Structure formats: structure tokens, C-alpha cells
């Protein structure tokens, strides 16, 4: 098998058939040896039924449909898809047609033109979303690039073509809190970035609320940097030092000049400040501890309910 398309689907009932047709049209004269790996991430609409119909009525095509027992999130869906994919090249692509299948052909060309490239990743030069969200995302990339030891490219999505070596490396990382953008960089290999323009969603709506994005951003930082822990140590150290200096100054003032410093307000402010600082640092510690707690439970990343086409080989 030359190419596998890994397609995470969560409530995409109106998109999956159109996606399937559009890919087949785009690939018609260019690629013939490819498979679809649809991952139904616990959708509560008719996505799975529609995927099943696609699978049953298109026996000439290579199609796998994995279905989770509930919604485990796109990260788990991508991981399951990568594990099931049989292709020499694997492309992760959304089901909502925001990422055009024609770009996959461009990625394939880039990949085949240079044997030293292991991954072709598409990035959005211009995001067609609100100014606030764009600012939030660029701030996130600035912060995470300062904190983490691996590079994160602003605008690069999960839409990318990987070769077998890189896919195997990614599968070998089975951590529970997955943050693919970091994992792609962490495993190394040579990545070529090509610009693309995201289309508008065909049907349905984005699953990302601002709160979800914010949580995802924090998860990314915690997963790829331990610097916040060290920062909290540093802040603790600095505030403690400043308060000792302040104490010495007050004592000296009293001893030398005999001035009684009226300290009620200062003490309240200091107590609140130190209390706040301590809670803040405890919070950072808690973020890491919570991740460790979940990881040591060693729960699976997803639970598979169905796997259609697992052993089919149509070519
Ligand atoms: N998705 C998923 N599980 C989720 C959320 C999203 O598999 O919990 C899929 C979704 O069906 C789509 C892709 O991930 O194919 C990208 O999601 P979405 O379009 O909502 O994200 P956006 O394009 O807005 O970043
Ligand atoms: Mg989308």
C-alpha cells in the first residue's frame, strides 16, 4: 500500500461521504494505491452508520473504519489511525474538507522529489478566523517555543504526510496526554513545510471552543516543558529573598533611627502576595502531578468498539 489517509471523524455525518468522493476524484489519475482509515471518535450523530455504508458499498476501495466506544478526542483518533494504517506514506487529514485532498498530491510530490524528507507538513499562512483567536494562538506559540526544547511552527496543523519511519516513531510514543504538534517535532526527522489555505467547513461546526483550546495549550506546555516547575522555584526564591531584605530594612530603621514602621497594610499585602504565590506554584506542581497520576494508571488511549476492514486487502 502506497498511501493511507487517516481521517479522524467526530460528528461529521454530513461530511464523510463528500470527503470520500472528493478524495477519489482528486486522486483519480494520480494515485491508485491508497486506503482510507476513518476513525469514528464516538460521534453521537450518524457518522458511523454513514461510514459503514461507504465501507459496504465501495468494495473496490481499501477502507478501514475504526469506531471508538465514546469520544476520546482527536489526538487518540489520530493515534489509532496511525496504528491501523498500512501505507508506506500516511497522511492525517480532517473529514470536514477544510483541508483539500489536492494538497495531499502536492505533499506526495514534495516527498517523492527529495528522499531526505520524512514529513511534509502544511501550514496556514493566513488563518481565516477571528483576530482574537489568531493573537491567542501566536502568543501560545511564542510562549511554548521559549519554554520547550522542541520547535513548534505557528500555523502548522496536524495536516501532514509522514513516511513509514516517522509513523513508526510516533506510534512508539504511547503517552496518555498526547500533544501531536510536539510529538512530531520531538521524534526529529526532516520536515518540509508548505503553505496552504484552509477552506471553510462544509457542514457542521468546529469542535474547538476557546476554553478547549486554552486547556489544550496548557496541556501542550506541561507535556513538553518542565520549565514552569523551575520558574515556580525561582519565583519562590525571589519573593523569599525580597521579604528578608525588607525585614532587615525595617529592623535597621527601628534600631538606627528609632522609627516604628507602620506596617499593617504592608503585612496584609505581603501575606496576600505570598499566599497567592504559594497557591500559584502549588497549582503548577498540581498540573504535573495530575498528568503523572493519569499516566501511571496506564489506561488505554481509546477503546475500540468496531474495526471494519481490518484484514481486507483489495489490491
Ligand atoms: N475531531 C475528532 N475528535 C474530536 C474533535 C474533532 O476526531 O474530539 C476531528 C473532526 O471530526 C475533524 C478534525 O478532528 O475531522 C478537526 O476538527 P475541527 O474541524 O473541529 O477542528 P478545526 O478545523 O476547527 O481546528
Ligand atoms: Mg475543521
Image (cartoon, rainbow, N blue to C red):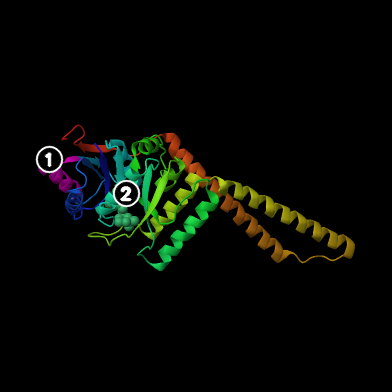
Instruction: Return the residue nearer the eye: 218 or 3.
Output: 3
Residue 179 seen in render: no
Seen in the picture, residue 226 relative to 153 is either above or below; the reply is above
Residue 196: name its quadrant: bottom left
Q: Which residue is mark 2?
A: 107
- Magenta-colored stretch includes residue 53: yes
Magenta extent: 47-63
Q: Which residue is mark 1?
A: 60
Task: Find residue 283 and report its horizontal and vertical position in percent.
Answer: 54, 50
**Left or right of 172 in this view: 265:** right
Task: Find residue 111 and report its horizontal and vertical position in percent.
Answer: 34, 45
Q: Residue at x 31, y 59 (%)?
A: 198
Q: Residue at x 41, y 68 (%)?
A: 131
Name the quarter where the C terminus is drawn: top left
Mark 1 or mark 2, which is nearer the start of the sequence? 1
Name the quarter where the N terminus is drawn: top left
Q: Main SS of the magenta segment?
A: helix
As measured in the structure, the alpha-carbon distance from the residue carrying label 2 to the one carrying label 1 is 25 Å
Amino acid at each position: 500500500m502506497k498511501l493511507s489517509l487517516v481521517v479522524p471523524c467526530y460528528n461529521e455525518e454530513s461530511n464523510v461521504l463528500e470527503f470520500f468522493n472528493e478524495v477519489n476524484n482528486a486522486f483519480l489519475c494520480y494515485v491508485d494505491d491508497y486506503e482510507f482509515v476513518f476513525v469514528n471518535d464516538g460521534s453521537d450523530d450518524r457518522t458511523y452508520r454513514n461510514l459503514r455504508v461507504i465501507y459496504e458499498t465501495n468494495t473496490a476501495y481499501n477502507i478501514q473504519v475504526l469506531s471508538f466506544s465514546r469520544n476520546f478526542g482527536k489526538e487518540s483518533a489520530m493515534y489509532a489511525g496511525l496504528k491501523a494504517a498500512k501505507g508506506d506514506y500516511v497522511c492525517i487529514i480532517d473529514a470536514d474538507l477544510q483541508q483539500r485532498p489536492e494538497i495531499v498530491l502536492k505533499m506526495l510530490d514534495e516527498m517523492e522529489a527529495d528522499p531526505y524528507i520524512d514529513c511534509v507538513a502544511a501550514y496556514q499562512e493566513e488563518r481565516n478566523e477571528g483576530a482574537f483567536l489568531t493573537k491567542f494562538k501566536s502568543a501560545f506559540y511564542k510562549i511554548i517555543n521559549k519554554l520547550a526544547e522542541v520547535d513548534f511552527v505557528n500555523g502548522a496543523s496536524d495536516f501532514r504526510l509522514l513516511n513509514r519511519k516517522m509513523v513508526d516513531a510516533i506510534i512508539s510514543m504511547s503517552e496518555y496526554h498526547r500533544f501531536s504538534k510536539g510529538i512530531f517535532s520531538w521524534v526529529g526527522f526532516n520536515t518540509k513545510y508548505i503553505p496552504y489555505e484552509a477552506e471553510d467547513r462544509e457542514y457542521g461546526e468546529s469542535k474547538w471552543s476557546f476554553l478547549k483550546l486554552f486547556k489544550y495549550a496548557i496541556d501542550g506546555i506541561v507535556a513538553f516543558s518542565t520549565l514552569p516547575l523551575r520558574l515556580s522555584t525561582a519565583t519562590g526564591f525571589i519573593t523569599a529573598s525580597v521579604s528578608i531584605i525588607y525585614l532587615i530594612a525595617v529592623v535597621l530603621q527601628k534600631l538606627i533611627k528609632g522609627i516604628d514602621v507602620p506596617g499593617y497594610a504592608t503585612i496584609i499585602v505581603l501575606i496576600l502576595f505570598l499566599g497567592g504565590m504559594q497557591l500559584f506554584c502549588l497549582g503548577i506542581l498540581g498540573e504535573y502531578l495530575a498528568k503523572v497520576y493519569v499516566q501511571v494508571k496506564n489506561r488505554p488511549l481509546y477503546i475500540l468498539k468496531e474495526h471494519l476492514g481490518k484484514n481486507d486487502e483489495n489490491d
